Image (tube, rainbow, N blue to C red):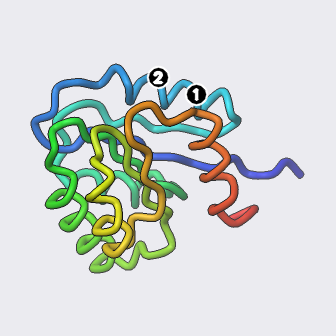
Amino acid sequence: MAKRKIRVLLAKPGLDGHDRGAKVVAHAMREAGMEVVYTGLHQTVASIVNQAMQEDVDVIGLSIMSGAHIPICRKLMSMIKEQRLDNKLVVVGGVIPNKDIPALKQMGVEGIFPGGSYFDDIAAFINAHVPPGR
């Protein structure tokens, strides 16, 4: 029986209108053998959590270029806990200053990939943190 592919939800929360990077990351994750659901622009945190449940994903990935990563991730992690989705790997990428990484990790965001991160590093992190055959 074939091993189930890792399923990744890639979302653009808030009013951020720049999604070229998210689309390129989505393509790279597909090339790495993952199934990717891209939600498109201007998603609310509630819609992201809802889509993660509906799509039964292993990974929730946010692409944030607006600088609002701290409040968005705080709200996301709270909703994930409320919906008992604690088993989902949460990663965030985009414009993430190094000084904000400890706060994001403390919230429960496991993977943080600032602009310029290598696609192979993102894929390797996801592969290392999603249990096989989840």
* 107 left or right, relative to 4: left
Query: Could you say which is closer to the camera, residue 41 or residue 47?
Result: 41
- Mark 1: give few (<14), some (14-19) or many (20+) Cα within 10 Å: some
Q: Quadrant of residue 84?
A: bottom left
Q: Quadrant of the C terminus?
A: bottom right
- What's the CA distance linking mark 1 and mark 2? 6 Å
Q: Which residue is mark 2?
A: 24
Q: Residue furthest front?
A: 99
Eyeballing the image, is 95 above or below 18?
below
Eyeballing the image, is 112 above or below 103?
above
* 75 left or right, relative to 114: left
Eyeballing the image, is 85 above or below 76?
below
Amino acid type, residue under disc 2 in the picture: Val
Which residue shows up at 15% across the image and 38% down it? 66
Q: Position of residue 108 (x, y in %)?
A: 38, 72
Q: Which residue is mark 1?
A: 28
Tell me the element at label 2.
Answer: helix
Tell me the element at label 1.
Answer: helix
Q: Position of residue 91 (x, y in %)?
A: 43, 54
Amino acid type, residue under disc 1 in the picture: Ala
